[in-house]
Image (cartoon, rainbow, N blue to C red):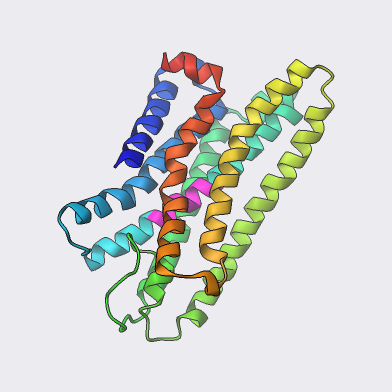
Amino acid sequence: LGIYLAALLGNGLIITAVACDHRLHTPMYFFLLNLSILDLGSISTTVPKSMANSLWNTRAISYSGCVTQVFLLLFLFIAEYSLLTVMAYDRFAAICRPLHYGTIMGSRACVKMAAAAWGTGSLYALLHTANTFSIPLCQGNTVDQFFCEIPQILKLSCADSYLRELGLLVVSACLAFGCFLFIVVSYVQIFTAVLRIPSEQGQHKAFSMCLPHLAVVSLFVSTGTFAYLKPPSLSSPALDLVVSVLYSVVPPAVNPLIYSMRNKELKEALR
């Protein structure tokens, strides 16, 4: 409840500040607004239901509720990852192409990029959810997790689910690696350009623009990668629970803190 309230407060303040303060109507804050909405959605998909179950001393969720939870989580996570990739491009354009920044990141281009991120998430979630729940589940109905997570659901299957999942896993891996490679290449060029800035003040300002985004990307990618690529020998119900909290609950609560900690414009808008 404490983490959930912190996420609501932090992301709600960022959304309000960006929406109400005309000084923050720039591409960077437009994408930050979208990120906060996605963070609010992702933590609200899992935590309220688990809190309600805890209060009512039950562990039940309906089949349709489970399907909805899987779809929303996939949609929000993939849309957020795509948006973080777009934000890396925004930082690249701001630092490496400053004279063309207004043209590259015009309002129409920003809306199209944000829409592409949301659209990618919805399409991926639709395909993955339909594929997961078309597999017959016959080994009980107990999911060892505080929300409906695909690896835990596949454990209930009596069919050879791995063959059916292989195609989507390949697509997922290509999408994830492509975005990650794009972010890495963008930041290599950004840091190369920053180190060429003669004044220390200029370098500090450039780094302060990039480091919050880089910290959020690192937190998102590292927790998600460990959750889904950890060796089977490390898997246990307790560890799976902790790892799931790390990648599904902690980032939405921590992201507003990371972005607002050293951001003077955002602090002034909040005041």
Instruction: Check the image and report above or below for 259 versus 116.
Output: above
Give percent across and percent down for residue 206: 70, 25
Position of 197 with respect to 71 (left or right) is right
Please tell me whether residue 151 belongs to the stretch shown in magenta: no
Q: Is residue 215 above or below residue 20?
A: below
* Image position, residue 155 (x, y; %): 40, 77
x 48%, y 13%: residue: 268
Q: Residue furthest bottom?
A: 159
Give the magenta part as a residue range: 73-81
Residue 173: image quadrant is bottom right
Residue 21 appears in the picture as rendered: no
| Of 263 and 105, the residue lying toward us | 263
Is residue 79 highlighted in magenta?
yes
Question: Residue at image x 45%, y 63%?
Answer: 239
Quadrant, the C terminus: top left
Can residue 113 be seen here? The reply is yes
Residue 171 position in % (x across, y down)? 58, 66
